Amino acid sequence: IILSGKSGDLTLKKEGTDWKSEGVTFVLDKTTLENLLRVLGNLEAKSIIEFDTPENLKRFGLEIDANPNQITIETSDKKAFSIRIGNE
């Protein structure tokens, strides 16, 4: 799991049954992380917004220069899924 935003990135990796953070040291709550993954795994889009122009991305605070909050999850078979969280 990579959590990205204006404050920087935080990478969390599962090693066996435990979660470890990279680059910083603090205690991770396994139950909270697994609940987060469960919630993210059950997300469904209510609507699709066309992001065909930079203006559309900017409207929702999703342009790269705005450094939007983003969650990226990589599966054990190296597939990556990302969710950007904008301002709308």
Image: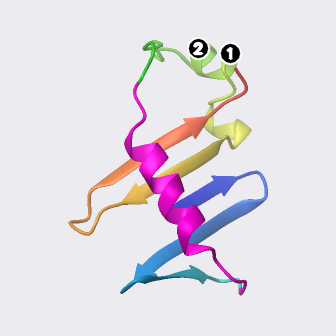
> How far is disc 2 from disc 1 in space, using C-alphas?
5 Å
**In terms of depth relative to the viewer, which is nearer, 10 or 42?**
42
Name which residue lies at 73% across and 26% down.
Answer: 87
Q: Secondary structure at mark 1?
A: helix
Q: Quadrant of residue 66?
A: top right
Residue span colored magenta: 25-44
Name which residue lies at 62% across and 14% down.
Answer: 55
Snapshot colouring: rainbow
Q: Position of residue 81 (x, y in %)?
A: 37, 48
Residue 59 is tagged as 1
Q: Is residue 76 left or right of residue 45?
A: left
Name which residue lies at 45% across and 16% down.
Answer: 46
Q: Do residues under tags 2 and 1 come within 8 Å of each other at their CB atoms? A: yes
Q: Residue furthest front?
A: 31
Q: Is residue 87 left or right of residue 52?
A: right
For the residue marked with disc 1, what is the amino acid?
Arg
**Count of labels in the image:** 2
For the residue marked with disc 2, what is the amino acid?
Asn
Q: Residues within 10 Å of mark 2 (few under 14, many from 20)?
A: some
Q: Position of residue 27 (x, y in %)?
A: 69, 83
Q: Is residue 76 left or right of residue 7?
A: left
Q: Position of residue 5 (x, y in %)?
A: 70, 51
Name which residue lies at 65% across and 83% down.
Answer: 23
Q: Which residue is mark 2?
A: 56
Q: Residue furthest left?
A: 77
Q: Position of residue 72 (x, y in %)?
A: 47, 53
**In terms of depth relative to the viewer, which is nearer, 35 or 43?**
35
